[in-house]
Amino acid sequence: MDILSDELSRARARGAVFSVLRRAEPWGLRFEGVRPLTAHILLEGSAWIERDDLDPAPVHARDVVLATAGSPYSLVSGPGVTTVPIAEARRTPSAPGPPGTRAPEATVMCGAYVLSGSVGESLMQGLPPFALLPAAEQEPAHRAAVDLLAAEAVRDVPGQQALLDRLLDVTLVYTLRSWWRTTEAAPGWYRALHHPHIRRVLENLHAHPEQHWTLPVMARDAGLSRAAFAAQFHQLVGLPAGRYLTRLRMSRAQDALLRTDQPLAAIAASVGYRNEFAFATAFRRQHGLSPGRWRADRRGDTGRG
């Protein structure tokens, strides 16, 4: 199983390009910072990304920036430039400089992701307010995808939006892989994928969380002694194997509670509990609520218990 692909799928991480803006200096775009994850790709030109509590960071042509939810921030042609809200800027996709001038220009593409549930939250935990991946640090195939985005952004042909959106999805996967490869903040399961024995266990846990997993069974799956497996799993993933399995099962259960009308007994069986009472006990221990109450609260349905 490809765990990253599975996690992105379960988080419903589908992106959509919502603007491609061409601007002549001086220019500034202001974002409220409320979206769970926003991608900015500077297709041409240069810029700065600013937030009140952070030092300004330069952004160059073909650089990719992933911005997580938080405080408002701006993309500007230079420090101190006046900004306009992105909603207002979208009404004028092309904004050349004053007549008779040849001000340097920039093309900015912005896309948004809707990530939901605890899976989406766990993916975002390892990202800072801005994850900036310079063009020079991108994999060759990633740079090719960004080049395709730049080429498609200036066209006006049928299917353009769908193609831009899918290329944005490609960019997210490349950016996450590159970012996590160079930071200690990557999710523990991702760091552990480089260890073949632990990777095998992780892939099996994610593929079949409903199976009867015990520490001896996991150790045998890894081809390690019980003590060696327990120590290596904890060191690489950051959690004991049993606790990781419980979190995985709870995450899958939350997803089912939110997105389906399955009865609690069916959800319990699907995530590895022998009955709904054992499941409810484990769920209440982690969330302080019964699964039925948690589902009703999250859905805003006071008629369900």
Image (spheres, helix red, strand yellow):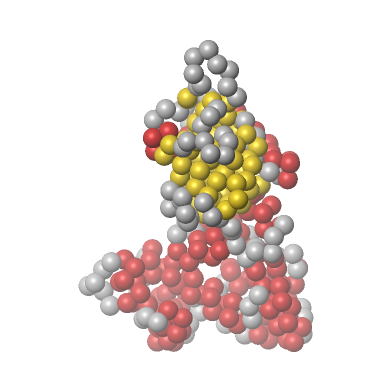
Question: Is 228 left, or right, of 294 in this rendering?
Answer: right
- 253 lies above or below 41: below
> Is residue 67 at all visible to an observer of this figure?
yes
Counting the numbered discs, the total is 0
Residue found at x 77% / y 83%: 228
Observer-nearest of 248 and 216: 248
Residue found at x 42% / y 79%: 287
Residue found at x 68% / y 36%: 144
Observer-nearest of 180 and 299: 180
Q: Position of residue 46 (x, y in %)?
A: 62, 34
The N terminus sits in image quarter:
bottom right
- 102 lies above or below 199: above
Q: Position of residue 113 (x, y in %)?
A: 48, 49
Question: Is 68 left, or right, of 266 in this rendering?
Answer: right
* Occupied quadrant, residue 232: bottom right
* Occupied quadrant, residue 88: top left
> Is residue 163 at all visible to an observer of this figure?
no
Farthest residue toward the left?
303
Residue found at x 45% / y 72%: 253
Farthest residue toward the top?
100
* Occupied quadrant, residue 138: top right
Q: Position of residue 51 (x, y in %)?
A: 53, 49
Q: Position of residue 292 (x, y in %)?
A: 33, 77
The C terminus sits in image quarter:
bottom left
